[in-house]
Image: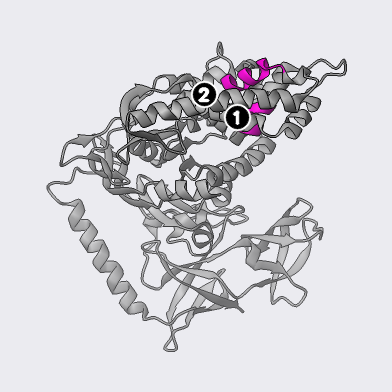
Amino acid sequence: MKELVIRRKNMPEIKLTNITKRWGKFYAVDNLNLHIENNSFITILGPSGCGKTTTLRMIAGLETPTSGQIKIGDQIVFDSDQGINIPPNKRKVGFLFQNYALWPNMTVYDNISFGLKNIKEELPVMDIELKTTSDVIRSLQNTNKLTQIFEECKEKTGKIDKKRLLLKLINTYTISKYTAEKIFKFNLHSSNDIEQDAKKYIQQFEEKKNKLIAAHQAKNETVNEKFEVVENGITKTIIRRLSNEEIDLSVNRVARIVKIGMFMDRYPAELSGGQQQRVAIARTLAPEPQVLFMDEPLSNLDAKLRLEMRYELQRLHVETGSTFVYVTHDQMEAMTLSTKICLMNNGLLQQYDYPLSLYNKPNNLFCADFVGNPSINFFEAKGKQNSDGTFTFTVLDDKTAVFTPEHKFNMQEWFEQRDAEKHSNDLDEKSSTKVEKENKDEVFKYHIQKVNEDYISDDDVIITNEDFILGIRPEKITVDVNGKLDAAVDGSMPTGMESTLKLNINNYLLTSVIFGSQSFVIGDRVHITILPYDILLYDRKSGKLIASGSVTIQ
């Protein structure tokens, strides 16, 4: 637990400032500002082509932004004004792709260790021999534990299962396979007196340990608890590659985390899809990246396995202490995995918020429609604010609705601020330094479902300040014998835990989620009630959220 806390402290923040990526006049990402806190699990969510993968690749260094600045921790990794662009291998990040990209001719062990063998950078000077010696002593000290391990690794014939024994030693004592092999060669599993033989080897290795420590002392050096060489209070470093011992310890560490230790000598073709995904994750975690980027890593798995892997990713996030940045178009993944969600559309950040905040108070019509399954109900509402701060609307053609906001505000002042912001944005678009945007930003075209669809373009409708949209989540519409609204069941989809209904009111189809085991038949007449809280009021002209509150429909 102590190690986990230390790791969390060392994880960097990620800051994106005015990041833009365009090809010609097409803006994949437009002026994105994003602050990812350390040790967070951020999901970049949105429809296909919204810019989420491009954003991920820019942070990782796999794509070069057109302009802006990216900062990981204290290091500026990209700055268009300063001409800084640090390559991906220098950013201390890991990348997990949709496809596992495992080498088919390599074992699981070799797949995980492959990248570690290519690392060459400034690293602490290690006394691997002293570490191995200390690990041997530590492993032999508890002979009762050793005896238990030997018994567990015996076959029915009484012969020791070497492969199983080595794995047990590695996992029990957190040692490398080389140290485990050394202990195996002592042949203690065949000893008539394990305790006595173990003491003999401990004595030998204690003498060796003392000689190694004395050699360092002669050079005015010490060795810390990580077996790093220290001189004058400073850890010595050198440009080097990882030793075989270090590589093996890293491989075993991530194998324990993702629970694939028993598959190390298998080839990818011998593994299931979920096991292959675990190997890919282990390979990415092995270099201990400060930030782990994942681009829809679960998209190739079946539904049941995807659910299991979501739990695994949650656990990995806690155990590794790394910052996770995850790209998906699956809102269920985003809602269940994230500490925060970055929702994008058409290259623009729509909302950056906690999952429940995004669901309960989406910033605009796009956010409200995209998040939630089944989708939110939109009601076109015409009316205005009353002197007491409430609103009176006409909805569903002939019904009166009264909306009471959570907090009182002046609607006219809200309109004035909206218009001022639009004017400022229009001036920015016309700026001589701004390249004309091909993929224009538009207000989201919401859909109101009817029994008989009549497709009327918004271009043919004059929208005024008396035009609003009410957003009502399906779970807010309930079947109630005392309900004042009469509806006909137009569709019913029971799952056992709940039923999703299509309800016909004045030719409008509303979606309702009814919890419990009630059954409904198409054509049934029911009374419904709209629960009077967490109802959303949107401006039809701009698509922006005005307020949340309660509503009563007469």
Distance Cα–Cα, label 1 vs label 2? 11 Å
Q: Nearer the viewer, residue 386 or 249?
A: 249
Q: Nearer the viewer, mark 1 or mark 2?
A: 2
In magenta segment, residue 384 = no
In the visual, does 422 lie left or right of 327?
left
Q: Which mark is residue 208?
A: 2
**Which residues, given as a range, are shown in magenta?**
168-187
> Which residue type carries mark 1?
Ile
Q: Looking at the picture, how far across and down is residue 91, in whole percent?
A: 33, 35
Q: Looking at the picture, how far across and down is residue 364, in whole percent?
A: 43, 60
527 to 306, vertically: above or below: below
In magenta segment, residue 185 = yes
Q: Answer whether labels 1 and 2 touch (C-beta < 8 Å).
A: no
Q: Nearer the viewer, residue 302 or 261?
A: 261
Q: Residue placed farthest to the bottom in the image? A: 388
Q: Main secondary structure of the magenta part?
A: helix
Can residue 322 be seen here? The reply is yes
Which residue is rendered at x = 43% and y = 61% of the image?
Answer: 363
Q: Nearer the viewer, residue 326 or 146?
A: 146
Q: Which residue is the site of mark 1?
A: 137
Which residue is rendered at x = 44% and y = 53% of the image?
Answer: 445
483 to 27, vertically: above or below: below
In the visual, does 465 lie left or right of 31?
right
